């Protein structure tokens, strides 16, 4: 399993890792509106019930920290409490201050505690003038009563496993073992880690901050969390920006399968582009030649894993790597040249990889498996993987294969049906490898009061403030600062890409945005 981040997210996570053992915020307990449904009759407290203090370590003094107690089970408000860790950067211009802007960087399992600090150099000043920037680790993540399943590096690297008849029985045993370990180590808490409960925690955060409404910026999985909040607490919503969107009707197994569907279209687009640039890259004069070269390398890696700068990649890992990169054609073309060299036995630089921690994997599975019911029969996964390996050869077998959710306890609640007219702004790249344009259109249909900004020819995962489209940034900033949505959906042009052969300027595996839903390897 690979998690990829932009450099800004690396800053956030590095800061969080530094701070996590020494959080100095005073614990406070707060109550919010009822756990579900409209909350118009509940008034927020006049002042914050949180005690903010210096975060400690090397964290700038402009960032404050606190810890909030929330109910483990929102049906039992007087029962066991768990911690939710918060951070805050106050609005830069108190005279212009409108309220608070909460952040969620995706995952699920991504630490958002210091996402405001990471974004503070990217967000426009007009937004920082108007909002207190609020970060938090969702329940079960990072510094917020973290989960652990006792997984190993091997477990974490192979969470989405390529289907093979010969290894399917081992995959089934692995999925059952991971589910058992997570259940046994988190008996009291595991079933209460869900998107619905995180949304309820957000409303407790709102109340503890003394706000009647909250604004929100959610990326990737954060778009689903934000949309669930709009459904549970519609009258508490101020200005919501949902960036790179999840289709709420597809959570969660079907959402993973959308990665494979999207990859085939992107792969065809990439082979065509690479053939048209054969004079530069020398990978084939026709799309068929580029495709044949790629699959020959995959077959070679399946026979004997390739040495990519000291790390061995088998064919499935090569497929996964290219799946990420093909939305950036020049980057993928350069990678294919390196793969060709490695297949020929030539030394190549190390390929950036990231293996999630035990907590990241545990909290990811808790949401994936705890939000929705998955098929329980191994035969379903076997049949789907065989089918999808043919329909979507780049990635279909992996995302349809057996998964620990097959052996998870039944969710306490059904997934939230999103169907409302709450205003929100959705921003989306056309060529997003992780939340395809089709899933953003699904969220747009569910949030009937929303508007969609599509970046034509936009590449990568994440849009707002990431240098993808000045037009899209302007629309989002205007909405956050004025509250006015566009009159209709908007199509924006992507900003010109850097020079095709500038790896430092072009997106690459090491700098794909933020925390993403776990991609598979």
Image (spheres, rainbow, N blue to C red):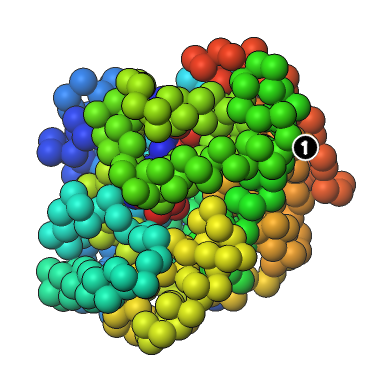
The residue to which callout 1 is attached is: 456
Nearest to the observer: residue 43 or residue 448: 448
Q: Residue at x 69, y 50 (%)?
A: 265
Q: Residue at x 61, y 71 (%)?
A: 249
Crowdedness near tag 1: few (<14), some (14–19) or many (≥20) residues, C-alpha within 10 Å: some
Assign a secondary structure to mark 1: strand
Considering only vertical position in the picture, is 244 above or below 310? below
x and y percentages locating residue 162 in the rendered image: 39, 60
Considering only vertical position in the picture, is 230 above or below 48? below
Residue 333 position by quadrant: top right
x and y percentages locating residue 350 in the rendered image: 32, 25
x and y percentages locating residue 485 in the rendered image: 77, 45
Nearest to the observer: residue 360 or residue 379: 379
Taking the view exactly as shown, the residue that stands out farthest to the right is: 487
Q: Is residue 47 left or right of residue 192?
A: right
x and y percentages locating residue 489 in the rendered image: 82, 48
Q: Is residue 144 left or right of residue 477?
A: left
Residue 47 at least partly seen: no
Nearest to the observer: residue 183 or residue 303: 303
Residue 321 position by quadrant: top left
Q: Residue at x 48, y 71 (%)?
A: 385
């Amino acid at each position: 399993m690979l998690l990829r981040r932009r450099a800004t997210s690396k800053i956030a996570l590095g800061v969080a890792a530094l701070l996590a053992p020494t959080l100095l915020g005073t614990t406070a307990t707060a109550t919010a509106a009822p756990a579900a449904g409209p909350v118009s009759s509940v008034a927020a407290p006049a002042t914050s019930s949180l005690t903010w203090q210096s975060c400690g370590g090397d964290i700038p003094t402009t960032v404050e920290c606190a810890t909030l107690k929330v109910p483990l089970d929102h049906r039992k408000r007087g029962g066991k409490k768990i911690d939710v860790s918060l951070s805050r950067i106050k609005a830069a211009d108190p005279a212009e201050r409108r309220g608070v802007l909460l952040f969620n960087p995706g995952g699920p399992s991504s630490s958002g505690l210091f996402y405001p600090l990471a974004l503070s150099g990217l967000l426009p000043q007009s937004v920082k003038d108007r909002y207190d920037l609020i970060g938090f680790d969702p329940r079960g993540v990072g510094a917020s009563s973290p989960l652990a399943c006792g997984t190993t590096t091997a477990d974490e690297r192979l969470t989405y496993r390529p289907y093979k008849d010969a290894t399917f029985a081992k995959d089934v045993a692995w999925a059952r073992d991971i589910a058992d370990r997570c259940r046994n180590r988190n008996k009291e808490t595991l079933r209460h880690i869900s998107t619905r409960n995180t949304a309820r925690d957000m409303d407790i955060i709102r109340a503890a901050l003394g706000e009647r409404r909250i604004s929100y910026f959610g990326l990737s999985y954060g778009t689903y969390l934000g949309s669930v909040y709009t459904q549970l607490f519609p009258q508490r919503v101020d200005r919501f920006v949902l960036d790179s969107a999840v289709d709420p009707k597809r959570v969660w197994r079907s959402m993973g399968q959308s990665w494979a569907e999207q990859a085939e279209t992107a792969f065809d687009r990439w082979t065509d582009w690479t053939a048209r640039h054969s004079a530069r890259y020398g990978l084939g004069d026709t799309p068929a030649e580029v495709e044949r070269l790629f699959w020959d390398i995959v077959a070679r890696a399946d026979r004997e894993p390739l040495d990519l700068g000291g790390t061995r990649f088998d064919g499935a890992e090569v497929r996964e790597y290219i799946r990420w990169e093909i939305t950036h054609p020049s980057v993928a073309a350069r990678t294919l040249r390196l793969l060709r060299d490695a297949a020929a036995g030539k030394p190549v630089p190390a390929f950036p990889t990231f293996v999630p921690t035990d907590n990241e994997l545990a909290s990811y599975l808790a949401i994936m498996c705890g939000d929705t019911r998955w098929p329980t029969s191994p035969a379903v996964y076997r049949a789907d993987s065989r089918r999808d390996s043919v329909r979507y050869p780049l990635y279909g077998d992996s995302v349809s294969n057996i998964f620990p959710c097959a052996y998870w306890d039944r969710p306490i609640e059904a997934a939230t049906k999103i169907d409302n007219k709450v205003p929100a702004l959705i921003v989306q790249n056309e060529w997003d490898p992780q939340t395809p344009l089709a899933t953003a259109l699904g969220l747009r249909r569910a949030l009937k009061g929303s508007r969609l900004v599509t970046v034509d020819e936009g590449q990568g995962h994440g849009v707002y403030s990431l240098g993808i489209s000045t037009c899209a940034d302007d629309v989002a900033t205007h909405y956050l600062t004025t509250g006015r949505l566009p009159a209709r959906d908007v199509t924006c042009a992507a900003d010109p890409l850097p020079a095709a052969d500038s790896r430092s300027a072009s997106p690459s595996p090491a700098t794909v945005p933020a925390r993403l839903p776990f991609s598979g390897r």
